[in-house]
Image (tube, rainbow, N blue to C red):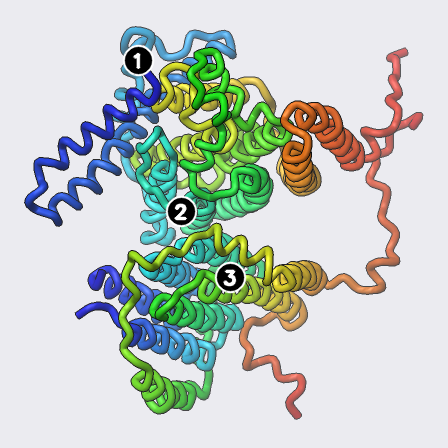
Amino acid sequence: MNIAFYLLALVAVLGAGLAITLRNVVHAVFSVLLFFSALAGLFLLMLAEFIAAVQVLVYIGSVGILMLFAIMLTTNVMGDPNRPVRSRGWVWGGLAVIALLAGVLLPLISRTGGQTPTPLSDFNPSVKQLGMVLMDPYFASVGVIALLLTAGLIGAVVAATGASEADQKKTVPANRPNYPNT
Amino acid sequence: MNNFFDLKLVELGRWIEAFFADFPSLKLVVHLLLCTLPLALSFMGAFAFTTWLERKGLARIQNRPGPNRVGIFGLLQPIADGIKMLIKEDIVPERSDKLFHFLAPIMLMIPALIGVGFLPLGDGLHALPLDSAIIFFFAISSLNTIAVFMAGWSSRNKYSLLGGMRAVAQMISYEIPLVLSAVAVIMIAGSLNAQEVVASQQISSWVGSGNILQEFFGRILGWNVFKPWGFAGFIFFFVAALAEANRSPFDLPEADSEIIAGHLTEYSGFKYAIFFMGEYISAFAIAGIGVTLFLGGWNGPVFSGLPWFVLKLFSLFAVMIWIRGTLPRLRVDQLMGYAWKFLFPLAILNIFLAGFYHFIERQWGTAIAMLAGWILGFGALQLAATALSRLNQSPIMRSKRVYQLVE
Amino acid sequence: MGLTLHHFLILSAILFSIGLVGALTRRHIIIMLICLEIMLNSANLNLIAFWHFSPNPLPLHGPLFTLFAIAIAATEAALGLALVLAIFRHYKTIDPESIQDLKE
């Protein structure tokens, strides 16, 4: 159990670290995919199988591909070798984050107890219970997420294609070739 | 007679493990090896056999002999192919991204091999018995798209990139009808566990009784493909599975008659063989899930268990080969239009049909449900399909044809 | 030494800070979005860790919350990338420091 945790944690930190330091954006996306899969492994270690499956399906299978497509559509793929990698205030940014980590997060963590997990005989998470709970008390949340996803879909299409009032009034040209007698 | 092979195999596994009863960690390793190694080896053997089957089958459909030099009926052809692939020069383009060019074939094999672990091969023969196995399978099969993109991008070749992007667009578009048609099955079976989905496809009241005839038919007629929503779902699942596995008629990314081989352009020798193997094994995995969800898994009349699963899997693969030899290839815009404008609405309607059938069955029994389901439900689906195909046709196809005679 | 809650929380804090450093210091819009996803994922890890180590874990505490968090994060990634496409079409650059129209 311990070896699996340390190995997965190492891969996760490696993936995230490479993602923020690599120059080539596509390499950075591949390393963040590695990070997502290490995280899916950690979810599986904590017996949340459904969430591990959803993590792989949504993050690696969809969000990762979305990022790759966005890179293909926006950047000069072969790369500009003189592009600056780090922003001008990077020293202050790094110091602020280290201050956050050491000053806020670690003291908070040390204050929580060092709990151990519940023994496996009592621990019985099942997807069926999750499904039943999603239907009965939390159905409104599912409806709200559905609305959010629909709004996100429509908004993404509008934002990405730049549809505007002027476009809607343009007439669609006839796409029939010019056959005689028709 | 039922579950004969499954019980014998499980007994064999326990007998082997009993030798290591004194060393618990070694026993764990042996248990893991027993779960995974036979599966991987037998699927690779099946891959070798299937390459022969495909070449021979396609050849007979196209009225030519096929491989017949290497052994009797050309049965040693896979060995000759393997030797040829191994001794070919491995060409890596100089400006390519060497690490990802090397990783892409491996990234295709890994999801394929993990995917065949989720198949319930028999009663108790299940390599990865997770509680949410079906959705895990769809998650793992979505890793194929990453491998294809990696192959297309790392070759630093604009044709590879174009082919790779097209292949990725095709695969992500067809994931949606694939998962939606599985959702109907999961909704009715009530569980994501593969063994439970298989067990729900026996008519349990008939199988438990002693009557031989009822037992015989109880193990066949319960399959999901004989219910109206299951039949439609199976068709959608099969078409989407063909597209996910990049097989004809959806094989635009890697077609034989295209000038460029898409994302596989810059791969030669052993890496190409690994790509080939990965694609075939992932086609096996998706066909296996199709068998589990719709064709009743390992249920069968007399020798219930592993032999029936293998029979169904190979017959589905034979249908894939048959379709490859028969139908022409779809163009890329026809492909995308088919997924989004035809299969996706129909798969959603299929879920409604499954719910409709389920509630009528609970209220009034199976016979009336079958009648109402096939006539009303399937009729509604057929109507929707006709309406959608009419709507999606371009104006040229809808206008009346005019013939011109040569004067 | 068995695994305790501390291990997971410290890992999640480290991952969050790595994401935050990336979001603050990189000069490419898409890398900033990637770092946003890293931060959201580390928060999900936190949620599941607290669920796993709680004394009476029902499925409606951990996975439910995490499921909604994943759905919302995916929507936000999609919208963010659509906005990146729109920005690129207008400014022809992906360097956030050269988009200075609102600066006087």
Q: Residue at x 34, y 61 (%)?
A: A46
* Residue at the outermost front position: B210
Residue A174 in percent (x, y) is at 86, 42
Residue visible at 32% across and 11% down in the picture: B74
The disc label shown at residue B233, or none: none
Q: Is residue C42 left or right of residue C94?
A: left
Q: Nearer the viewer, residue A94 or B351?
A: B351
Give SS at disc 2. Answer: loop
Q: Is residue C32 visible?
A: yes
Place residue A105 in its image quadrant.
Answer: bottom left
Circle 1 packing at 10 Å, graded few (<14), some (14-19), many (20+), is some
Report which residue position mark 1 lands on.
B75
Secondary structure beneath dot 1 equals loop
Label 2 resides on the chain identified as B
Q: Chain of mark 3?
A: C
Q: Amino acid at mark 2?
A: Asp
* Circle number at residue C67: 3
Q: Is residue C86 above or below residue B303?
A: below
Element on which disc 3 rests: helix
Return the disc, 1 or 2, that comes first in the chain's sequence: 1
Three-letter residue code for mark 1:
Leu
Compute the Cα span from label 1 to label 2. Answer: 40 Å
Residue B404 lies, in percent from the top left, at: 88, 17
In the rendered image of this protein, does residue B59 appear above or below residue A153? above
Residue at mark 2 to residue at mark 3: CA–CA distance: 17 Å
The numbered mark at residue B131 is 2
Tell me, yes or no, whether the two marked residues, 3 and 1, touch with CB atoms within 8 Å.
no
| Left or right of residue A162: residue B138 | left
Residue type marked 3? Leu
Quarter of the view holding residue C3: bottom left
Q: Nearer the viewer, mark 3 or mark 1?
A: 3
Q: Residue furthest left?
A: B22
